[in-house]
Image: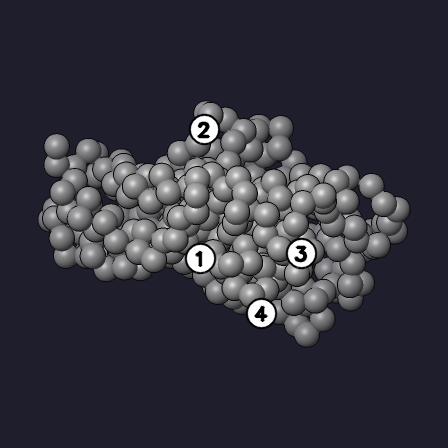
Amino acid sequence: MRPFELTVPATVDEAVASGHTFLAGGTTLVDLMKLDVVTPPRVADITALPLRGISTEDGLRIGALERMSDVAAHPGVPPAITRALTLSASQQLRNMATIGGNLMQRTRCGYFRDTTMPCNKRSPGSGCGAIGGTNRMHAVLGASRHCAATHASDLAVALVALDAELRITGPDGTRALPLTDFYRTPGDTPDIENDLRSGELITDVLVPHPEHAANSTYVKIRDRRSYEFALCSVAATLEVTGGVVAEARIAAGGVGTIPWRLPGVEAALRGEPATESSFAAAAEIAAHGAEPLAHNGFKVPLLKRTLVRALLDLTGGGER
């Protein structure tokens, strides 16, 4: 790890004015600093800032410094968020990692984390080792010729499905931003991963209508049962009236370069019977536009099956 200057700002305004890299739980940043993947000269420890609390008075508000384990245990949190959190990482990490830090975590692509390998996300212009290399864990949706790394957060997938917003504070004031507009696909600039501007800090996560998420779930498919990232995941909410789907909100993880919302599938489900056959028909368009690499083509059918499984979970089994 390279030497750096550590500061402890007393207020949010002091933190955003510092221009430093923010340190909260440290479960991502410290690892990357040890590997020399990121080498910030100045780090601001923000763990003492007043950015905690969970409120359900006007929608659901979660302070960015709330720990993942505490949010998962809160009774006012929708099932999709609870499941996404409890299926993330390990209990030890969930006790340390913060909500804001989880949403800001970097990809787990091995080429990104190995400084001897080419990676346009880490070193723009160096190339993407995954495109012609080992790419079983990589994205089939949203990739470009410059990057195919998947987004790592389980929580972000659930929040995208729930129409969550971020409250962001920076040198120019405070703004709200839908999470669907926060993350960026790699395109020609894979090193720019989100819409966070210089000096800005996520202070809160807002779910404007948590009642819509009462019937929600998160299904995660992975190589082992714990401490593993998703090969494919689906967060879904479903509102069914008289046996017919009135509304659906769906996002996928493990298959895209960002948490991948599926509006086409949502539209295909509305007005259809809440049955397995309807779910399977809608799932056929889930991977529209997918461009598999040499080793990850299995993710296309896996996404369809995972989607159907999530919807069946929400309907008690559907049509058999």
- Disc marking residue 280: none
Which is more N-terminal, label 4 or label 1?
A: 1
Count of marks, rendered view? 4
- Can residue 118 be seen from the camera position used here? yes
List x then y, in percent, for residue 172: 68, 74
List x then y, in percent, for residue 69: 56, 35
- Can residue 161 be seen from the camera position used here? no
Quadrant position of residue 277: top left
Residue indicated by mark 2 = 223
Q: Residues within 10 Å of mark 1 (few under 14, many from 20)?
A: many
Which is more N-terminal, label 3 or label 2?
A: 3
Which residue is located at x 84 percent, y 54 percent?
41
Q: Is residue 278 left or right of residue 232?
A: left
- Mark 2 touches mark 3? (CB < 8 Å): no
Q: Amino acid at mark 4?
A: Arg
Which residue is located at x 71 percent, y 39 percent?
31
Front residue of 34/58: it is 34
List x then y, in percent, for residue 287: 32, 51
Q: Residues within 10 Å of mark 4 (few under 14, many from 20)?
A: few
Callout 2 secondary element: loop
Q: Amino acid at mark 3?
A: Ser
Callout 3 secondary element: loop
- Mark 3 touches mark 1? (CB < 8 Å): no
Which residue is located at x 71 percent, y 71 percent?
171
Which is more N-terminal, label 4 or label 2?
A: 4
- Disc marking residue 126: 3
- Mark 2 touches mark 1? (CB < 8 Å): no
Front residue of 150/217: it is 150
- Closest to the camera, between mark 3 and mark 1, is 3
Residue indicated by mark 4 = 175
